[in-house]
């Protein structure tokens, strides 16, 4: 039976010397006969790099009487190596005393080849999974971009429809309204000159008439700006110069502290000075109204990465609620009791026409920031 099995079987003494071996073991080690294998130390049949580990495992078998499976490279008589597996167990005499080791030896070449093929197959599957995952990720990103683009297109279509509706009646009524407001304003001025000696109550009401006329005129002009904005007339501008001019136009109250963080070097863009000033002024006006005329307004101008310039206006007001952050640039949307919702809509339209981007960042109770990015090469893009 020992000669018929497909595994090599070798018996060693306690010192590791081979005392018996079957024909299969003789063949596995490339020996011509059993005599050539007998007398050799078992560790001489194992590749040197695996000897220390194999010796420790065999010592454990001798001390504890346990069975050890030893994966190691086996050495043939001609010095060639091949992967093998040794199952070592204790050999005892009739009295139960240990007298050596019984080692069942297997050629692990096919198993190693199968493991290698399995590993390569697993790695291939992992690569396929990664490729498919990457493709799915890209497809999902494309889908998300398409959804975002469609959403933006839908939002812009809604805005365009609103602007078209506003534009249909703004031109026809603005002239009549301006005439009426001019009449009211001139009449108030006339009464103010004639009643300059009137009591304080009369003077207060005349001032209220003038303020209301100015406010109504501003609203009409904003409506015309929103519905009849011309294409920008581009000129080379330094944002460090035009931004303070826009702040001055906004007539910021003395109770609002303005902090300016401007770089030493020029931040040049190609833009329409009138439209850009109007956009910046509207943003400053909105910030002052949000702070109710007192607080801190921080204005930062800088050259951003990849050929963009950035301008940001940060106020110390109550902030914008999350549900309103995406709507504050919509025409006719306002959270203020007296607001019409034109200021930030005009600012967005101006920035869009200049090839830029505008966004709002805020946390409730921690103020709001309106950030603008303008391309430094706007002139070249418009030329193209």
Image: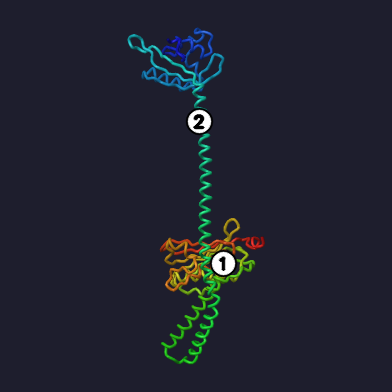
Name the spot of residue 115 as percent of width and height, x first. Answer: 49, 27
**Looking at this rendering, what residue extends furthest in the left direction?**
95
- State the residue in front, 5 or 15: 5
Q: What residue sits right under mark 2 in the picture?
A: 119
The local secondary structure at tag 1 comes to helix
- Residue 375: x and y in percent read 60, 60
Asked where in the image residue 351 lies, by quadrant, the reply is: bottom right
Residue 329 in picture, x, y percent from top left: 50, 65
- Foreground pick, 334 / 320: 334
Residue in the image at 52% along x and 34% along y: 123
- Please provide percent x and percent y for residue 114: 50, 25
Q: In this rendering, is residue 357 above or below 101?
A: below
Residue 263 located left or right of residue 111: right
Is any part of residue 248 visible from this angle? no
Q: Quadrant of the N terminus?
A: top left
The 10 Å Cα crowd at callout 2, few under 14, some 14 to 19, many 20 or more, is few
* Residue 350 marker: 1
The disc placed on residue 178 is none
């Amino acid at each position: 039976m020992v000669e018929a099995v497909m595994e090599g079987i070798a018996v060693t003494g306690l010192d590791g010397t081979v005392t018996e071996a079957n024909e299969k073991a003789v063949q596995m080690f490339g020996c011509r006969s059993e005599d050539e294998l007998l007398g050799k130390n078992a560790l001489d049949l194992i590749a040197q790099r695996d000897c220390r580990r194999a010796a420790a495992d065999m010592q454990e078998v001798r001390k504890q009487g346990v069975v050890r499976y030893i994966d190691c490279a086996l050495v043939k008589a001609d010095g060639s190596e091949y992967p093998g597996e040794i199952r070592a167990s204790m050999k005892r005499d009739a009295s139960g005393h240990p007298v050596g080791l019984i080692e069942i030896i297997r050629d692990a070449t096919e198993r190693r080849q199968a493991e290698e093929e399995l590993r390569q197959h697993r790695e291939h599957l992992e690569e396929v999974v990664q490729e498919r995952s990457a493709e799915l990720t890209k497809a999902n990103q494309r889908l998300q971009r398409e959804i975002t683009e469609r959403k933006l297109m839908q939002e812009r279509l809604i805005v365009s429809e609103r602007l078209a509706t506003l534009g249909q009646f703004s031109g026809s009524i603005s002239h009549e309204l301006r005439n009426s407001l001019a009449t009211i304003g001139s009449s108030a001025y006339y009464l103010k000159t004639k009643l300059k000696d009137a009591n304080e109550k009369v003077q207060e009401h005349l001032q209220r008439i003038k303020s209301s006329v100015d406010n109504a005129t501003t609203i009409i002009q904003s409506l015309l700006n929103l519905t009849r904005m011309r294409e920008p007339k581009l000129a080379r501008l330094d944002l460090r110069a035009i931004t303070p001019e826009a702040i001055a136009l906004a007539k910021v109250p003395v109770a609002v502290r303005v902090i300016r963080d401007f770089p030493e070097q020029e931040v040049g863009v190609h833009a329409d000075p009138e439209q850009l000033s109007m956009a910046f002024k509207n943003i400053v006006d909105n910030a002052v109204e949000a702070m109710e005329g007192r607080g801190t307004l921080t204005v930062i101008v800088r050259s951003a990465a990849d050929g963009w310039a950035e301008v940001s206006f940060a106020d110390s007001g109550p902030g914008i609620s999350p549900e309103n952050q995406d709507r504050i640039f919509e025409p006719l949307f306002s959270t203020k009791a007296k607001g019409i919702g034109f200021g930030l809509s005009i600012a967005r339209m101006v920035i869009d026409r200049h090839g830029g981007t505008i966004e709002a960042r805020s946390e409730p109770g921690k103020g709001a920031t309106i950030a603008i990015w303008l391309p430094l090469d706007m002139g070249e893009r418009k030329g193209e």
